[in-house]
Image: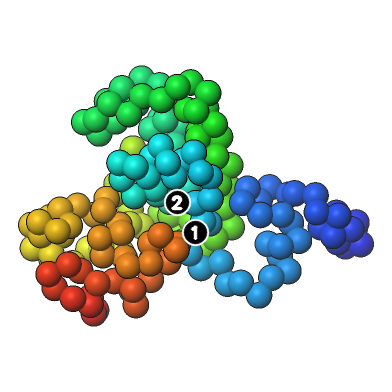
Amino acid sequence: MFAASLTLGLAGINSSHAEEGFFSSYFTFDRHNEVAAVTDADYIEECGSCHFAYQPGLMPEDSWRKIMAATALEDHFGDNAELDEDVRTHILDVLVKASADKSYYKRSKKIMSSLGNDKAPMRITDIPYIKRAHHEIPAKLIKDNPKVRSLSQCDKCHQKAGENIFDDDTVVIPGHGYWTW
């Protein structure tokens, strides 16, 4: 059995790992603590032109399906974000393939394990894991901070969010400085 599994892995046949192959996910020196990178040019261009291009591993598939539904994009959190159907379905496919429920990255796993009955929140800020990770930060540093305004602005404080790193060491809150627990 092991030999067959190893052979499949060496052949590069993908398992259920969305963002990586079988071999690279199990036989790597990378720690996979964070989330998979955003690499799709269409997603970065279309979504990243208006807001931080959130890594797909920050939300489960059902959330991405809700957010990327054609009717939902007509009123995308107060903005019209309609896309050509072929672009919309392509971006949805990218998001679904690397969504939190298909990821083996540590932070994505934590996100999924934090979701109770609401397995498909519409906002990253509604995910229990995200709420817990930020619960000690006073409102004056986020909501009342004109340079931040919301937890949805990940890259305002997480200086390496674009590099898929969200650890405490890289948090610099605008107008405050490094966040220390």
x and y percentages locating residue 126 in the rendered image: 29, 47
Q: Who is closer to the viewer here, 111 or 41?
A: 41
x and y percentages locating residue 180 in the rendered image: 23, 79
Q: Is residue 19 left or right of residue 44?
A: right
Please report contact status of discs 2 and 1: CB closer than 8 Å, yes or no.
Answer: yes
Measured along the vertical axis of the image, is residue 174 above or below residue 130? below
Q: Which mark is residue 55?
A: 2
Viewport quadrant of the C terminus: bottom left
Dot 1 amino acid type: Val
Q: Who is closer to the viewer here, 5 or 95?
A: 95
- Colouring chosen for the image of the structure: rainbow
Q: Which residue is drawn at 25% across and 60% down?
A: 156
Q: Residue at x 63, y 48 (%)?
A: 18
Q: Which residue is drawn at 33% across and 53% down?
A: 128
Dot 2 amino acid type: Gln
Measured along the vertical axis of the image, is residue 62 above or below residue 41? above
Q: Which residue is drawn at 37% across and 45% down?
A: 48
Q: In this view, does 9 lie to the left or right of 103?
A: right
Viewport quadrant of the N terminus: bottom right
Looking at the image, can residue 95 be seen?
no
